[in-house]
Image (spheres, rainbow, N blue to C red):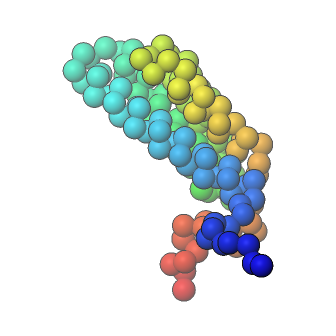
């Protein structure tokens, strides 16, 4: 008897870390955007700094993930993660949710995404290269 196929492929740790990092970055882009709207309403410098930490950290982290062949990708990924961690330590109504989310991206800092793993192009561009 053949086992039932679920249609899901088994993912390697590097693929899981890459997608987890992308989800974490999206979460912080959304939170940073909400904080920026609060800055526009209140004109408080604290909210501007928090918005820069959230949005800038997410963008730097994604740059480090997606452009692994760039010489600055490793440091951009680390700086982006640290900026998101600083943003997540700010007390909010979400309690510890941002901190848990940013900690889930921590394993991605220790995995190196090589161009050979991508096959020369990031997975999102591979299908369009033909």
Q: Going by the picture, which residue comes out furthest to the front?
A: 1
Residue 40, position as x, y percentages in the image? 24, 24
Q: Does residue 50 sit above or below 1 in this rendering? A: above
Q: Is residue 103 visible?
A: yes
Q: Is residue 60 visible?
A: no
Left or right side of 32 for 99: right
Residue 105, position as x, y percentages in the image? 64, 39
Q: Quadrant of the N terminus?
A: bottom right
Residue 66, position as x, y percentages in the image? 59, 56
In the image, 6 versus 117, the foreground residue is 6
In the image, 100 versus 37, the foreground residue is 100
Residue at left offset 47%, top offset 35%? 28
Left or right side of 94 for 116: right
Residue at left offset 60%, top offset 52%? 19
Residue 129, position as x, y percentages in the image? 54, 80
Residue at left offset 71%, top offset 61%? 11
Q: In which quarter of the view is residue 93 placed?
A: top left
Q: Going by the picture, which residue comes out furthest to the left?
A: 41
Q: How many marks?
A: 0
Q: Quadrant of the C terminus?
A: bottom right
Q: Does residue 7 sit above or below 130 in this rendering? A: above
Q: Does residue 114 sit above or below 20 in this rendering? A: below
Residue at left offset 58%, top offset 74%? 126
């Amino acid at each position: 008897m053949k086992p039932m196929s679920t249609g899901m492929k088994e993912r390697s740790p590097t693929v899981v870390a890459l997608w987890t990092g992308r989800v974490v970055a999206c979460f912080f882009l959304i939170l940073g955007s909400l904080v920026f709207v609060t800055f526009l309403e209140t004109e408080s410098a604290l909210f501007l700094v928090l918005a820069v930490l959230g949005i800038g950290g997410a963008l730097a982290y994604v740059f480090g993930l997606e452009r692994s062949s760039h010489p600055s990708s490793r440091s951009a990924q680390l700086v982006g993660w640290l900026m998101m961690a600083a943003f997540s330590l700010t007390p909010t109504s979400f309690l510890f949710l941002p901190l848990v989310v940013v900690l889930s991206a921590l394993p991605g800092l220790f995995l190196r995404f090589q161009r050979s793993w991508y096959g020369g192009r990031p997975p999102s561009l591979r299908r369009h290269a033909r």
